[in-house]
Amino acid sequence: MRRVEAEHLWPDAVADALSRFEWAFGQPGRCPSGPYESPGIEIEDGRDDLDEALRYLPRGARADLGRLVARIDAEFERRTLPDPGWASEWTAGRWW
């Protein structure tokens, strides 16, 4: 079996991505961001790294990471989707 490697990942890329989300979700508020974000590099970029890792991991590790990613997705969605309690007619249906 030929070993296939992720093209855009570096050593510790998964750990870095997970720690970015862990830090951001530990902060108050609805708009998570990391402490070291640069213009053009957002916390969501870590999610892209996790997706790439999922494509290359063996089945067991992929399932374990997949469970973590599902929790990240649920928390990110909970924090970032518009809050219907403050949404007005003007904001209804808009996403920006």
Image (tube, rainbow, N blue to C red):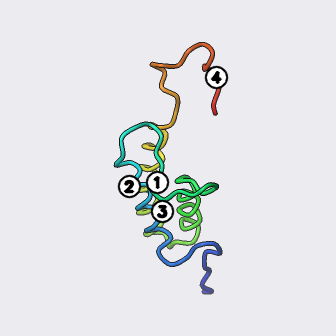
Residue at 56 percent across and 15 percent down: it is 88
Spatial CA distance of label 4 from label 1 is 28 Å
The quarter holding residue 41 reads bottom right
Q: Residues within 10 Å of mark 3 (few under 14, many from 20)?
A: some
Mark 1 or mark 2, which is nearer the start of the sequence?
Answer: 2
Spatial CA distance of label 3 from label 2 is 10 Å
**Amino acid at the residue labelled 1:** Gly
Please report contact status of discs 3 and 4: CB closer than 8 Å, yes or no. Answer: no
* Residue 17: assigned label: 3
Spatial CA distance of label 3 from label 4 is 31 Å
**Amino acid at the residue labelled 2:** Trp
Up-down: is 15 above or below 27?
below
* Residue 23: assigned label: 2
Up-down: is 61 above or below 87?
below
**Amino acid at the residue labelled 3:** Ala
Q: Position of residue 78 (x, y in %)?
A: 44, 37
Q: Position of residue 80 (x, y in %)?
A: 50, 37
The quarter holding residue 89 reads top right
Give the secondary structure at mark 3.
helix
Q: Is 25 on the left or on the right of 40, as rendered? A: left
Give the secondary structure at mark 2.
helix
**Amino acid at the residue labelled 4:** Gly
Residue at 40 percent across and 61 percent down: it is 19
* Residue 34: assigned label: 1
Q: Quadrant of the C terminus?
A: top right
Mark 2 or mark 3, which is nearer the start of the sequence?
Answer: 3
- Comparing labels 3 and 2, the label whose residue is closer to the camera: 2
Please report contact status of discs 4 and 1: CB closer than 8 Å, yes or no. Answer: no
Residue at 34 percent across and 49 percent down: it is 26
- Comparing labels 1 and 3, the label whose residue is closer to the camera: 1
Can you identify the residue that label 4 sits on? 93
